[in-house]
Amino acid sequence: MKKLNQNGYALLNVLMVFTLVTILGISLLSITISSQAYVKHSKTYLEDMTKAEKRLDEASAEYEVLLEGINNEVLNSQTLLTKLGSLEARIEQRSGIEVTAKTLKQITATNNLFVQTVDITAPVGPEHAGKKLKRTLKVSTIADIFNYGVVTNGDLTLNGAVDIKGNIFVQKRLYLSNRGKFIQSGTTYYPGTVYPSIQGDMTVKGLDASGQPYSSAYFYNSSSSSTTAQNFRPITNTGSLSSYFVSSPRIRDAIVSTNQINILGRINEKHAAYTARKGQIANGLNNSLLSGTTVYNTSKKFLQNLELTGVLNVAGDVLMEGNFTMGEAGRLITSGNVFINGQADLKGTIELTNPNSYVYINGKAAISNLNLDGQMYISDAADIRSDFNTNGTVYVEKNTSIENLNNVSGGTAVILSNGSMLVANNNEYSSTPKIIDAFLYSNETLEMYGVGSNIKIKGGVYGSNIILNATKGETRNSLGGRYVWVGPKWYHYEWRYDLDPELYNNVGGLYFEKNQQKPGLPSRLQIEFKEDLILNPPTGIPTVEKLKVETIDTEVK
């Protein structure tokens, strides 16, 4: 009986093993079949995605060709929409292609600004639950340069850990350094840091003024130890460019119109309008101070220097023959233009109720803590400090200085200088960046500092030559000058500085974190392209005569 039981158990074990092997076999077979089906599905999906993308490429290319065909015609607001509608209808004739257009800004009799988005959609095969591939194009009259994070028709110099998110276009040469730059007491210092980081496409033409190529288009700083000098040498092997970036850009050969904006011409037009208008407004006023609330139902001319600390509301133009000072409590509201024939010190709020109105200043301008609803033209230099809240455009004839800039309007401040532009002393020695919504432009050299400063430009920059200087992490002008309680240590109490001197390098009187190569340590100068600059363009942004199409995005729906 005992032997029989043992045989029974052996048989039972065999059956259990057989059953287990059978189950595993069936499971493996199921997995194999599922894997094959998944691979087949994935392969089909990729093939269908490729076909859909090709169809979008063809439709987008055809749209661009058709658009160029109407660019040679003189179109007003109504005929333009009709013509564009016919282009969209022709594209939609392609099998399965859907086209949807949305006009964001329409051309008017006084404004050449036009912005439209065009969604072109293609199905991703019949087997993928109605999935579609959508490409969004932007059609506009906004100048090419506003589609880039950094643009120069000259040289671009990146001193140190500049962080750029957006496309870059350089007409001449690119200079790369792993040292920042700052000036202290008349001496220029180059503290050690890392090379720049660029996330986007980069085009470096390497062409001189006559359109001929230089012997080299790329240069790097070969000085490894000096903090008071740099030595740039050509990069002979462009295949090694990745060695000079923390994050490397994609090298492209884009075509961009970098023609300078005629700032002086636009300002002169406003000056001519001022000259014509001042003889048309009679009965000048002799007020030198306006407080409280003052209302005029017609255009007014003020003959003396005027200070505004209250509210001035004018139904028409406001013309000032002297200097104009407006305090932080001041508010100027007008349905016309503002003409200032002297210098201007502007705080408070200027509200232009007509979108085509503007402020013209026939002298130097100091701007700080100002809210501006509209555009401004300055026929001299400009000093812009602190809050400048605007979704508008400022044209400056001479040099422009920008310090502690801030823009919380929800729009973008476009500042265009015919002279040089210096952006320095913004959010100094702070641990967190100040976000500035702006596009900064100079027809001469634009130089920007992110060493003591700590800023993030959401928009972009343009210069005839551009110099960007940055380090990473903490920068201090001292080690703190105070002690911090750290509690008992053994039998006594210990005090220490709030920053450890062993972790910081002293260069030119400033203190920099030693570990500049630390991953994730943020740059003190960041530039990030802002698509909303195009989709929600500021009042007065420069335009061109012809429509241009750009691809914004491609996504699966």
Image (spheres, rainbow, N blue to C red):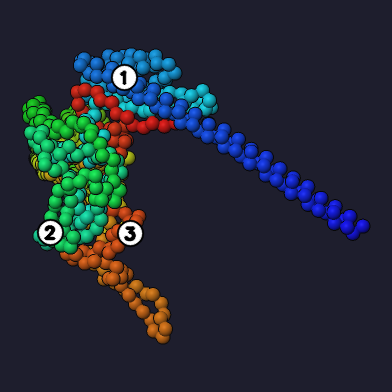
Dot 1 falls on a residue whose secondary structure is helix
Q: Position of residue 491 (x, y in %)?
A: 41, 86
Dot 3 falls on a residue whose secondary structure is loop
- Residue placed at 45% from the left, 28% from the top? 47
Task: State the residue in front, 117 or 390.
Answer: 117
Label of residue 62 in the image: 1
Few, some or many C-alpha atoms within 10 Å of disc 2 (few <14, some 14-19, many ≥20)?
some
Q: Position of residue 320 (x, y in %)?
A: 12, 36
- Residue placed at 34% from the left, 77% from the top? 495
- Whether tag 1 and tag 3 are in contact, CB under 8 A, the answer is no
Residue lying farthest right? 1
Amino acid type at image mark 3:
Lys
Q: Which is nearer the N-term, disc 1 or disc 3?
A: 1
Q: Which is nearer the N-term, disc 1 or disc 2?
A: 1
Q: In this picture, is 168 found above or below 433?
A: above
Label of residue 518 in the image: 3
Amino acid type at image mark 2:
Ala
Mark 2, residue position: 229
Q: Quadrant of residue 151 in the image? A: top left
237 displayed left or right of 488? left
Q: Which is nearer the N-term, disc 2 or disc 3?
A: 2
Q: Position of residue 532 (x, y in %)?
A: 32, 35
